[in-house]
Structure formats: C-alpha cells, structure tokens
Image (spheres, helix red, strand yellow):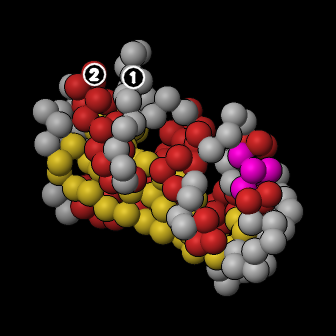
C-alpha cells in the first residue's frame, strides 16, 4: 500500500523508510507543488495541515510529522519553530547553545507528532513520540541532522549524531511515533 509522506525533505523520507523497515507500506513523496503553510500552534496542528495538503495533492492516504526540539530552560523553545530558529542548521545550533550558555538546566526533548489522514483529509490516527535528553555544551558526532550533534540521549553519554542510524531510529521521537502508526495500520 502506497502512503504519501508529507515532506519535501528526502532525508526525512529516507529516515521514515529505514524506521519502517520491511513492511507492506511504501512511503512516497507528495506530488509537485507541496508547500503547506504551517501556521498551527502545536506539533499536532502542523502535522495535520501537512497531511491534509499531501492528501489533497496526491489523492492518497497521507502521513505527516511535525517535530522539533523543546528545551526546558527556554520554556519549550524552539519547539514548533525548530526548523526556522535561525537561517542554517549550524546557526540554529549556535543560537541554541548561546541561549543556554549560562544555564545549568540542560534538559530537553525531541517531540514528533504524526497524523495519518484519508484521501479526503479525515483524521484516521494521530500520535506523538518523545525522546528525552539534554543539550551538550558543544557538538559531537557527524551522523543525523538538525540538532542531533548537541542532543545527548537520556540514559546514554552520546549525542544522536554519535549513534548509528539503526540505534537512533530505535529510540528517536520519530521512530516511536512511526511505530505507533505502523501498529495502527497493521491492525486495520
């Protein structure tokens, strides 16, 4: 069964395929013109906006995620603005580290909300996955993307960027949310 995965980011699609593994579901990019306005105030609202736009364009069941980093010392920021916190991935990391440079509270979590909709945009399933950890004082590792080089996973002494893709996918916020979606789909 083909499912449109509502993203313009081929890396995110690849990560979804790796997490899903050997399954009967084939995740594909949305058609040309996919550019939803993410004006929701929560991860769930933004994932629904993206899923509905992908379903409208593709005429297929569509899945979207909206994810980000929530830092306790910054009252949950950058949150839904994680991808727009600064102009480039490195500038986003630098801005984050500068914002909490004098904070002893380094607690943070990655959050991923996923929404599965019918071809008509009706919500079939919505869920959330979280991965707790803390923000490192400097970058470590070269795997992953986004804030992975500064996010130390709870219970480890490694940033997400120091983990193999397989290890990361087992514990990540996106991996947890997608597993719930796959369980839902398999039980239909």
Residue under label 2, please give it: 57
Q: Which span is picked out in magenta?
A: 92-96
Residue under label 1, please give it: 34
Q: Quadrant of the C terminus?
A: bottom left
Front-lying residue, 141 or 21: 141
Question: Residue 66: horizontal and vertical position, in percent?
Answer: 43, 48
Residue 186's quadrant in the figure? bottom left
Can you name the residue that lies furthest to the bottom here?
A: 155
Front-lying residue, 147 or 170: 147
Position of 6 with respect to 185 (left or right) is right
SS for callout 2:
helix
Q: Quadrant of the N terminus?
A: top left
Position of 52 with respect to 32 (left or right) is left
Residue at the location (17% across, 51% down)?
A: 124
Q: Magenta region, mostly helix, strand or loop? A: helix
Disc 2 or 1, which lies upstream in sequence?
1
Q: Is residue 63 above or below residue 172?
A: above
Residue at the location (48% across, 68% down)?
A: 130
Question: Residue 76: horizontal and vertical position, in percent?
Answer: 53, 64
Q: How far apart are the two marked residues, 2 and 1, measured between alpha carbons?
A: 7 Å
Q: Is residue 89 above or below residue 71?
A: above
Question: Residue 156: horizontal and vertical position, in percent?
Answer: 72, 80
Question: Do the numbered discs 2 and 1 sit on residues whose CB atoms are within 8 Å?
Answer: yes
SS for callout 1:
loop
Position of 23 with respect to 102 (left or right) is left
Q: Residues within 10 Å of mark 2 (few under 14, many from 20)?
A: some
Question: Residue 175: horizontal and vertical position, in percent?
Answer: 49, 61
Is residue 21 in view from this perspective? no
């Amino acid at each position: 069964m083909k499912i449109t995965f509502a993203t313009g980011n081929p890396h995110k699609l690849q990560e979804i395929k790796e997490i899903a593994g050997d399954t009967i579901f084939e995740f594909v990019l949305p058609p040309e013109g996919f550019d939803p306005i993410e004006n929701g105030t929560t991860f769930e609202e933004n994932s629904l906006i993206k899923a509905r736009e992908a379903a409208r364009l593709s005429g297929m069941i569509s899945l979207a995620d909206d994810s980000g980093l929530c830092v306790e010392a910054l009252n949950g920021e950058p949150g839904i603005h994680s991808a727009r916190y600064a102009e480039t991935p490195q500038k986003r990391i630098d801005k984050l580290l500068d914002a909490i440079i004098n904070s002893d509270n380094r607690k943070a979590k990655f959050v991923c909300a996923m929404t599965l909709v019918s071809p008509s945009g009706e919500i079939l399933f919505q869920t959330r996955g979280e991965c707790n950890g803390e923000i490192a004082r400097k970058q470590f590792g070269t795997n992953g993307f986004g804030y992975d080089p500064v996010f130390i996973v709870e219970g480890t002494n490694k940033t997400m960027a120091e983990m193999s893709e397989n290890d990361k996918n087992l514990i990540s916020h996106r991996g947890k949310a997608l597993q719930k979606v796959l369980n839902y789909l398999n039980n239909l």
